[in-house]
Image (cartoon, helix red, strand yellow):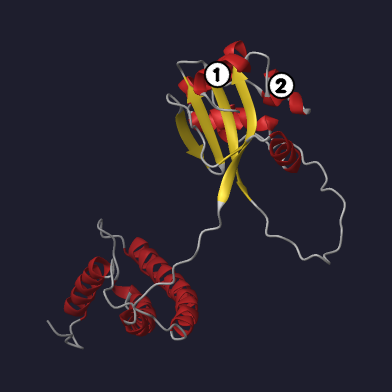
Amino acid sequence: MMPTFFDSTADAAEASEALRGLAHASREFDQPAEMYGVIGDLSSGMRSLRQALDQIADVHERKAAHAFNDAGNHEAGVRDALTTAEELRQAANLVDQAYDRLAKGFIAAGRIGWHSDPVVKEEVPSRWVSVVFLQGEEADRPLRILGELGHVDAVDYLAQWDYGDETTRAALENGYVYDEPGQGTNDRVVLSGDYALVVNPHVGYVSLLRRYTEPEAEPQDAEQVGPAPVQGGPELLDSYSSPGAPKRADLPAAKRDASWFEPAKITAVKQARGLVL
């Protein structure tokens, strides 16, 4: 179909169908450069939409003397006609704001040069530092949280032992740094952000590790600075306040020395896994 330029009903139906087709077709572009032209056409369409809304609002006001509601009430019909005109003008003003945003996007899109081959960004190598290792009765609570509320809440609970740089330094000094989390035969690993939750149901332990990116080597003449201030443990996420979840006040006090890395009961687990944790 082609626009009639005189039949508003037919042209509105065609515009609606064209936009529906565009919504379907614009899910993917084989040639990204084509998006610039599409944005330009949409910009032109928004100007026309703004004009149409204003004009239809004008007609509602001019023809208000002919308006009645379904029950034949003229005063109610006039009120509805004037309300319609007002709402259409408000919509036209919002279209104006959207047009301004679209115009800025159109200008920015015009500065893009699309290449056929993407740039492959090299990933910064990262390792994993141990945050906390719990076994036996100490592991009961996080395991219960894991089973009842899920791994996000279990990570939130264990993250109270993470003291940022202090935890990282302790892990590096004690050798609790790994290329991958969960290297035991029966280890189950679940990721949540920069944390890895490792659970071994056979041995009965749970541990939390955090992703660690080694800093680049500083120049020899770099200014010497003091040690970074100790950071407090992260606040628990809202999910930990779910109905039935343990309260923050009930949480055990986090240990701040390096001794929590290796509880007395861990020796048997080391031998069972053949790894040093």
In the image, farthest residue toward the bottom: 5
Q: What residue is at 55 percent from the left and 23 percent from the top?
A: 206
Residue 169's image quarter?
A: top right
Q: Residues within 10 Å of mark 2 (few under 14, many from 20)?
A: few
Task: Describe residue 11's horizontal placement relative to residue 193 as left or right.
Answer: left
Q: What residue is at 46 percent from the left and 32 percent from the top?
A: 189
Task: Describe residue 133's horizontal placement relative to residue 9 as left or right.
Answer: right
Residue 260's image quarter?
A: top right
For mark 2, what is the residue?
Answer: 249
Task: Describe residue 183's horizontal placement relative to residue 32 as left or right.
Answer: right
x then y, percent, for residue 234? 68, 38
Quarter the N terminus occupies: bottom left
For mark 1, what is the residue?
Answer: 271
x then y, percent, for residue 178? 57, 39
- Label 1 sits on what residue type? Gln
Q: Answer whether residue 244 is visible to the viewer in this image.
A: no
Q: Residues within 10 Å of mark 1 (few under 14, many from 20)?
A: few
Sequence-wise, the earlier of marks 1 and 2 is 2
- Label 2 sits on what residue type? Ala
